[in-house]
């Protein structure tokens, strides 16, 4: 099952509006995040998982808000575990992105440095030949 949330983590509860038009409860040009909703058959616990992998939108505060917006029947411990799991997933994603950006930045500097050295050598050769 899926649902939508705004960029703050507030659920739209689509399943509560099966016969309604989206224009009745969604704003024009609103940015939304697709959320996977999983219900456990054993204890009726509900897990909300954002399907967007954007570290600037899906932050730890987004995850916490999303968890708090869950169904009232969700057990608090289950929500806390889900929140902790999602927050750690977001933090891992942020760390990987930071490392990737750092690597790309250093690789770019190395390429520019090698290019500058090559250019300097060529200029030195031209001066010697004159």
Image: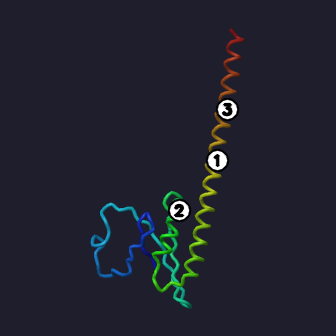
The image shows residue 48 at horizontal and vertical percentages of 50, 75
Q: Tell which circle, 3 or 2, labels the residue nearer the N-terminal end.
A: 2
Q: Tell me: residue 29, above or below residue 40.
A: above
Between disc 1 and disc 2, the foreground one is 2
The residue mark sitting in front, 3 or 1, is 1
Q: Residue at x 60, y 55 (%)?
A: 97
- Residue 113 marker: 3
Q: Position of residue 7 (x, y in %)?
A: 43, 63
Tell me how far mark 3 sits from mark 1, CA to CA: 16 Å
Residue in the image at 66% along x and 36% along y: 111
Q: Earlier in the sequence, mark 3 or mark 1?
A: 1
| Vertical placement of residue 117 versus 124, above or below | below
Q: Quadrant of residue 104?
A: top right
Q: Nearer the viewer, residue 1 or 74?
A: 74
Measuring from the top left, give residue 72's x and y in whole percent.
46, 83
- Give left or right: position of 35 versus 114: left
Given residues 108 and 15, the one toward you in this image is 15
Q: Rounded to the nearest whole Å, what is the CA distance between mark 1 and mark 2?
A: 20 Å
What is the count of numbered marks? 3
- Residue 12 left/right relative to 95: left
Reading the image, the residue beneath label 1 is 102
**Relative to 64, does residue 107 appear above or below in the rendering?**
above
Colouring convention used in this rendered image of the protein: rainbow
Dot label at residue 9: none
Mark 1 and mark 2 in contact? Answer it, CB < 8 Å. no
Residue at 44% in and 66% down: 33
């Amino acid at each position: 099952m899926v649902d939508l949330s705004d960029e703050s983590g507030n659920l739209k509860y689509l399943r509560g509006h099966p016969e309604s038009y989206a224009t009745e409860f969604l704003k024009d040009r609103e940015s939304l995040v697709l959320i996977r909703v999983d219900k456990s058959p054993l204890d009726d616990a509900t897990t909300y998982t954002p399907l967007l992998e954007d570290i600037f939108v899906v932050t730890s505060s987004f995850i916490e808000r999303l968890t708090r917006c869950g169904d009232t029947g969700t057990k608090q411990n289950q929500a806390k575990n889900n929140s902790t799991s999602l927050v750690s997933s977001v933090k891992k994603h942020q760390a990987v992105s930071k490392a990737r950006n750092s690597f790309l930045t250093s690789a770019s500097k190395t390429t520019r440095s090698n290019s500058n050295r090559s250019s300097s050598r060529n200029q030195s050769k031209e001066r010697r030949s004159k």
